Image (cartoon, rainbow, N blue to C red):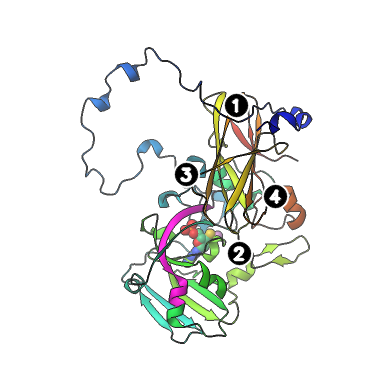
Amino acid sequence: MSETGKKGASRRAVLGAGLAAGGAVAAGIARAQSADPLITDVQDWASSFGDAVDAAPYGTPIHFESHVVRRNVEWLTESPVSSINFTPIHALEGTITPQGCAFERHHSGAIELSKQDYRLMITGLVEQPLVFTYEDLTRFPRSITTAFCECAANGGMEWGGAQLEGCQFTQGMIHNMEYTGVPLRLLLEEAGVKPEGKWVYAEGADASSNGRSMPLEKAMDDVLVAFYANGEALRKEHGYPVRLVVPGFEGNMWVKWLRRIGVYDQAVESREETSKYTDLMPDGRARKWTWVMDAKSVITSPSPQAPIRHGKGPLVVTGLAWSGHGKITRVDVSLDGGVTWQEARLTGDVKSKALTRFHLDIDWDGSELFLQSRAVDETGYVQPTKNQLRDIRGLNNVYHNNGIQTWWVRADGEVENVEIA
Ligand SMILES: Nc1nc2c(c(=O)[nH]1)N[C@H]1C(S)=C(S)[C@@H](COP(=O)(O)O)O[C@H]1N2
Ligand SMILES: [Mo]
């Protein structure tokens, strides 16, 4: 923690970021209040009854929280049925994303498919092609996995420079849920994969079908045919009644409304896969099959949509970190635009291929900050800066922007999306 006091003094002066080292902050938050009517007077809510127990058979968030919603960027896509919206990560805590505000990405709209009408086929290079009803799936042994689902385009609008005000828009194409379902391996074993079978092609029941190929090894490893998320049935927009959960892999592999699994000797080249989900490099070549999401992190508060309202003194800096390659082992936070770093606390359980929450408790002296976070995963991979990524991948590319985010916290507590050269 004393690191901040030693290194990088000159750069800090240039940036004008006056800093206070993090550490134990206990006193000075609550003030003695003598005549606060909220303490001294009897309140309305204590003078009459509240709602009866059956006011809402299925509850929704209290209206004070009505700003915590998915949002989209209208100019981003031509049509709302082939579009995306964003998780309000700036307003959430912990690691689990409630389904009701978890981002949605549809290529041809969210369809309504009942459990009665649901069928899953296993076809191709198998001993016995099979068709499962929803009820059939419920009779296989289940497992539970918590995993993040990140669209490959998350951060894609920021390749050219800081553009959107808030981590909801810059990093919010992500959600993290606890899924219950049947390991895809068990269904494939039931059908019997022939020795020539090397690839698995998954397809949805919607008009786009969103067909995607993955290596058989992945399908036999940790892929789940999921029907519950966060303890309840999947929401329609997340693939009710059944979706694929592909931990660590980019979101487009997580086929919703799953209707067919085909086993093949090579990858089935869907139109989408060849034209869209590739990373165009500066020399005109394209990176393909870049499924695994590299380590990334972002500070969710303070951030442009979550400015500091309470003035100087104790300040909780918090954010999310994740890696498609396994567990997050460390997150460093910089208050001065990457000159000096302090290690944040990884709070709660750290799970592989799932969101990890970090916190850093600082004593803010009220001067401007250039906040950054940098994730490290269990492979030793360190989250790169945006310029390091640009040096390698150029600017033609949309997908897989996992560069370090900078938030400029001004003395008045307002926060802006910026980049430091
Ligand atoms: N059947 C189907 N599955 C799909 C899609 C789709 O349009 N149709 N979109 C994919 C993409 S690109 C992403 S990022 C994730 C998003 O999942 P979500 O809508 O639950 O957030 O679903 C994937 N699965
Ligand atoms: Mo996506």
Q: Residue flagged by tag 1: what amino acid is it? A: Trp
Residue designated by label 3 = 94
* Residue denoted by label 1: 364
Question: What amino acid is labelled 2 in the image?
Answer: Trp
Residue at (53% x, 53% y) in the render: 174
Q: Quadrant of the C terminus?
A: top right
Q: CA distance from mark 1 to mark 2?
A: 40 Å
Dividing the picture into quadrants, the one containing residue 150 is bottom right
Where's residue 99, x and y in %? 42, 52
Q: Secondary structure at mark 3?
A: loop
Mark 2 vs mark 4, CA separation in Å: 18 Å
Tell me if I can see residue 255 in this picture: yes
Q: Is 23 part of what is drawn in magenta?
A: no
Pick the residue in front: 198 or 377. 377
In whole angstroms, how far apart are the C-alphas of marks 2 and 3?
Answer: 26 Å
- On residue 291, the disc is 2
**Near-viewer residue (59 or 383):** 383
Q: Residue at x 22, y 42 (%)?
A: 53
Q: Is residue 212 above or below residue 352?
A: below
- Place of residue 93 in the rendered image (x, y in percent of width and height, measured from the top left): 47, 42
Q: Which residues are magenta?
A: 172-188
**Residues marked 2 and 4 touching at CB (< 8 Å):** no
Q: Secondary structure at mark 4?
A: loop
Res. 311 mark: none
Tell me the element at label 2: loop
